[in-house]
Image (spheres, rainbow, N blue to C red):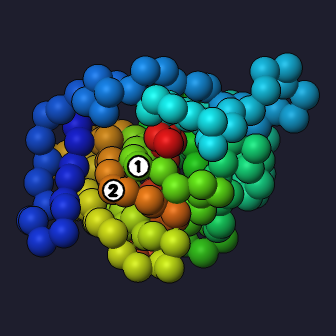
Amino acid sequence: MGKQATLQSNKLPTIEDAKFALDKFNIQSEIKASAWQGQVESAIDPAGVTVPTYICLDLEDLKYFEAVERQYERWGVIFHNSLAIQPSNPAFPTYSGLTVLMGAPKSGFLEATFLRPVNSVSAFVTSSQRLVLSAYDRDHQLLAQTALPGSNLANSDSTISPNTLLSITGNNIYSITFCAFDGQFTLDRFRFCF
């Protein structure tokens, strides 16, 4: 299991060993959301959710170098400046599977907008430098921030392991951004909770 980095409002960033357990948020279920349009299973209606439910995006159906925007819209999320890749650089290992998301074409930035507000977002991240995850409300006012304090590339002298879990919680999150200030980063197991 990865490590979790957290920073809430004015707290200093820290890295601590932690399991991102579903019980932490009283989560009853996790739905694996596919980008494949022909999927038989129907998409979740977030308005009808009465217990917290995680949506975990299955990135494996995405094509190599596919721009990721509206593939998961039926699950409640739209991406901006996102590309699906299968990393060839061993410094950016995947957490599971072969495919990850990367901020591109603008390097070091990725945004996700939610069609209905969510309460929590997480992903396993590997970054070439400090990576900030920010959550915003409907009016694009900052709700919370979390930071990976430095690089965590594989086979480097970093004390932070690759694929560190970065998560953020808050009420009525409408969008999030990942920003590595012109660095490179990858995301795996992107999850969010209604």
Q: Indicate which disc residue 170 carries.
A: 2
Residue located at (69% from left, 38% from top): 45
Kindly identify the amino acid type of the residue bearing the numbered disc 1: Asn
Q: Is residue 34 left or right of 139 when viewed as pictured? A: right
Residue located at (20% from left, 53% from top): 6
| Alpha-carbon span between mark 2 and mark 1 | 5 Å
Judging by the rendered image, the residue that carries numbered circle 1 is: 119
The answer to which of 65 and 172 lies nearer the viewer is 172
Specify few, some or many for label 2: CA neighbours under 10 Å numbering under 14, 14-19, or 20 or more. some
Q: Is residue 31 above or below residue 106?
A: above
Is residue 86 in view from this perspective?
A: no
In the rendering, at what x and y percent does residue 114 appear? 59, 57
Q: Secondary structure at mark 2?
A: strand
Kindly identify the amino acid type of the residue bearing the numbered disc 2: Gly
Q: Is residue 189 left or right of 3 when viewed as pictured? A: right
CB atoms of marks 2 and 1 within 8 Å: yes
